[in-house]
Image (cartoon, helix red, strand yellow):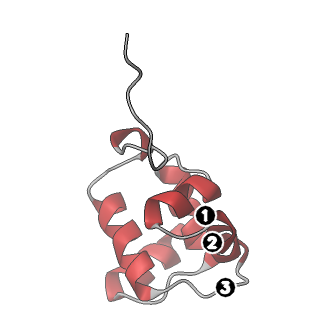
Amino acid sequence: NVRTSQERAARGGQMDATEYRAALKAMRLSQVRAGRWLGISGRTSQGYASGNRPIPHVVALCIRMHLKHGWYACQWEFRPPGWQVPQR
């Protein structure tokens, strides 16, 4: 199954829910956190993971590029809008 996903990625094909979930696991992202990172709602990300929504090509490209370069969640900053470093 992983090999099939890798072959599909090499051809630039459509990402399926199985590949999406595997990619999130490899990047140490929850479905909701991946949604925030991608700029979509958590429910949309969950829809991608369950197979209820088709995964856009742009999302697949972004995820595959980050996986290819070995990035994972702790290398990105996740701060809600308006968040500031507390002052001492």
**Pointer 3 residue:** 53
Q: Amino acid at mark 3?
A: Arg
What label sits on residue 88 in the rendered view? none
Place of residue 3 in the rendered image (x, y in percent of width and height, measured from the top left): 48, 72
**Pointer 1 residue:** 21
Instruction: Indicate the secondary structure of the residue bearing disc 1.
Output: helix
**Pointer 2 residue:** 18
Q: Nearer the viewer, residue 66 or 19?
A: 66
- Report how far apart the C-alphas of labels 2 and 3 lie in the structure: 13 Å
For the residue carrying disc 1, how many other residues have a C-alpha within 10 Å: few (<14), some (14-19), or many (20+)? some
Please indicate, yes or no, whether residue 69 appears anywhere in the rendered image. yes
Place of residue 71 in the rendered image (x, y in percent of width and height, measured from the top left): 33, 50
Q: Nearer the viewer, residue 10 or 24?
A: 24
For the residue carrying disc 2, how many other residues have a C-alpha within 10 Å: few (<14), some (14-19), or many (20+)? some
Residue occupying the point 37% across, 9% down = 88
Which mark's residue is nearer the viewer, 2 or 3? Answer: 3
Residue 70 horizontal side relative to residue 73, left or right: left
Instruction: Indicate the secondary structure of the residue bearing disc 2.
Output: helix
Residue occupying the point 64% across, 74% down = 44
